Image (cartoon, rainbow, N blue to C red):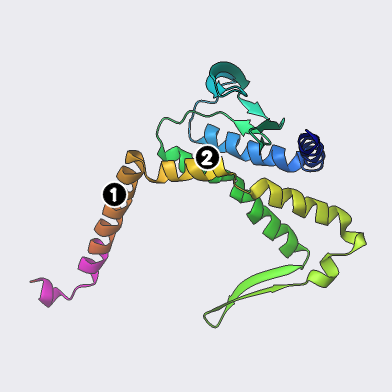
Amino acid sequence: MLSRVYLYISVFTQFLFYLPGTFLHEAAHWIVAKLTFSHTPTKAIIEDEDENGNKIHKTVSGFTIIPKIKKDQVVYGHVLSIPKFDIALVFISAAPLVWIVALYYILSHYGYISLGFENGNIYFSADYSSFFSLSNWLLIYIALQLIWASTLSSQDIKMFFKGVFSPSSFILLSFILLICELRCNTKIINYLPIGFMK
């Protein structure tokens, strides 16, 4: 019972601290779901299990950032989306990764990290000593929110691979490979010597 109390306190503390990051995470899912023309219901009836393991049907919100504890597993938020094709799951589930890109550009803008190419080599440098200072408390907080927002949950990863290994994904990949093959052949034919082509 005491461990359950500690769990609730921990979840509530994280909920308050990471509220902006949770919103950004779920917002990324929702926006990409809209961009892929997926259905995003405001409410839905889903099948779930109660504490005794009995199957029940309950109404859930289509977009929420209110955490729920389910069998000692914490879900900090969710977005319901029904894609027309499973390939859309790849983009919807991976959407929060955009925030790690945003974090890179913010830190790069202020000169705390740099990434580039020189003489065919990739170089990366980071100035940790000046970043982790009390004067940077707001930037540190923003960085923590963006890291939290970009972290994929186990459900996100599951949906990602469901989209990757779907028939629609196979069709799209086949189409892309076909286009690449046609383009390569066109280029090869264009650069072949006239004598060889005869």
Q: What residue type is labelled 2?
A: Ile
Quarter placement of the C terminus: bottom left
Asked if residue 187 is among those painted magenta in the image, a careful observer would answer: yes
Residue in the image at 63% along x and 55% along y:
101
What residue do we see at 36% from left, 41% from top? 166
Q: Where is residue 134 in the image (x, y as percent from the top left)?
A: 92, 61
- Give the quadrant of residue 192: bottom left
> On the rendered structure, is 181 left or right of 75?
left
Which amino acid does the dot numbered 1 rest on? Ser
- Dots 2, 1 in contact, CB < 8 A: no
Residue drawn at point x = 74 percent, y = 62 percent = 107
- In this view, 102 is above or below 88: below
* Mark 1 lies on residue: 174
What residue did someone put label 2 on? 92
Q: Does the magenta stretch include residue 101?
A: no
Q: Which of 45 and 62 is in front in this view?
A: 45
Give the answer, above or below, for where 104 lies relative to 175. Answer: below
Q: Position of residue 108 (x, y in %)?
A: 72, 64
As drawn, the residue found furthest toward the right would be 135
Q: What stretch is highlighted in magenta?
A: 186-197
